[in-house]
């Protein structure tokens, strides 16, 4: 079903607070505000919330997740602290900065040469009747089109003849818990 998550009033301020980082248990936090309910980012995506509200929430969720995973700098292992309003992190006592990442993903619709059928994927984790376009992460030194060709072969054993990049869309709640940039293709 669709989650009930109405739009924010036009003059409302939105923010995210990572209560887990503060040691607060979700159930205890809900007791403080009985009219509130916890919703996942995916619940929000499937709700009646406006595109603007979903975008704001997506950015907040992606940044909160990134702050949890970037507490230490990858090369030195030294702890980091938020700087520049939380847009970046900096090595504590140093100058090295850590930036939020966005993972590139190739996703696309594969149509038959006659244009009458399309190939969709289905995971055993999906609810009944749910299908999706094939997709996968773009590897280093790989174009979007090459990545989509590779994914189509790996996932479905299909060799693609034509792949065209059509559009892109940010996806703040990715499979790996990071923000993703979905680059949409159409292929035959």
Image (cartoon, rainbow, N blue to C red):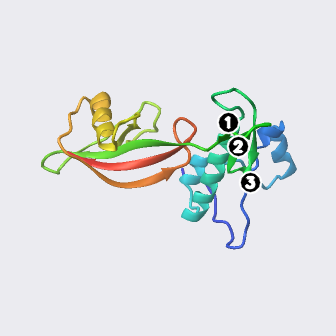
**Residue where numbered disc 3 is placed:** 85
Label 1 Cα crowd, 10 Å radius (few <14 / some 14-19 / many 20+): some
Circle 2: is it few (<14), some (14-19), or many (20+) Cα within 10 Å? many
As rendered, which of 185 and 144 lies closer to the eye? 144
Determine contact: label 1, label 2, CB under 8 Å: yes
Location of residue 55 in the rendering, given as x and y in whole percent from the top left corner: 58, 58
Residue farthest to the right?
32
The residue sitting at 83% across, 45% down in the picture is: 29
Instruction: Tell me the distance, in whole angstroms, between the alpha carbons under discs 3 and 2.
Output: 9 Å
Q: Secondary structure at mark 1?
A: loop
Of labels 1 and 2, earlier in sequence is 1
Whether residue 75 sits left or right of residue 111 in the image: it is right
Find residue 56 and report its image quarter.
bottom right
Image spot of residue 171 (x, y percent) = 51, 49
Q: Measured along the vertical axis of the image, is residue 56 above or below residue 118?
A: below
Residue 83 lies, with reference to residue 94, above or below; the image says: below
Locate residue 93 relative to residue 10 in the image: left or right.
Answer: right
Give the labeled residue for mark 2. 89
Q: CA distance from mark 1 to mark 2?
A: 8 Å
Secondary structure category for the residue under label 2: strand
Callout 3 environment at 10 Å: few (<14), some (14 to 19), or many (20+)? Answer: few
Please state which of residues 174 and 68 is positioned toward the viewer in this rendering: 68
The mark found on residue 1 in the picture is: none
Above or below 14: residue 130? above
Helix, strand or loop for disc 3: helix
Residue appearing at x 68%, y 27% in the figure? 76
Q: Is residue 155 visible?
A: yes
Q: Which residue is mark 1?
A: 70
Does the rendering let one see residue 130? no
Q: Residue 129: x, y in percent?
A: 39, 42
């Amino acid at each position: 079903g669709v989650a009930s998550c109405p739009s924010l009033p036009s003059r409302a301020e939105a923010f995210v607070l990572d209560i887990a980082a503060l040691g607060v248990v979700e159930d205890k936090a809900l007791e403080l505000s009985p009219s509130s309910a916890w919703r996942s980012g995916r619940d929000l995506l499937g709700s009646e919330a406006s595109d603007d509200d979903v975008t704001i929430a997506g950015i907040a969720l992606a940044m909160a997740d990134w702050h949890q995973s970037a507490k230490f700098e990858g090369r030195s292992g030294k702890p980091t602290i938020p700087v520049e309003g939380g847009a970046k992190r900096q090595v504590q006592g140093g100058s090295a900065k850590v930036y939020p990442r966005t993972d590139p993903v190739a996703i696309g619709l594969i149509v038959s040469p006659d244009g009458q059928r399309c190939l969709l994927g289905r995971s055993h984790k999906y609810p009944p009747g749910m299908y999706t376009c094939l997709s996968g992460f773009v590897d280093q030194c790989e174009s979007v089109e090459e990545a989509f060709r590779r994914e189509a072969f790996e996932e479905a054993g299909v060799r693609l003849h034509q792949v065209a990049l059509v559009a892109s869309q940010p996806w703040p709640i990715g499979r790996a818990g990071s923000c993703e940039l979905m680059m949409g293709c159409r292929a035959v």
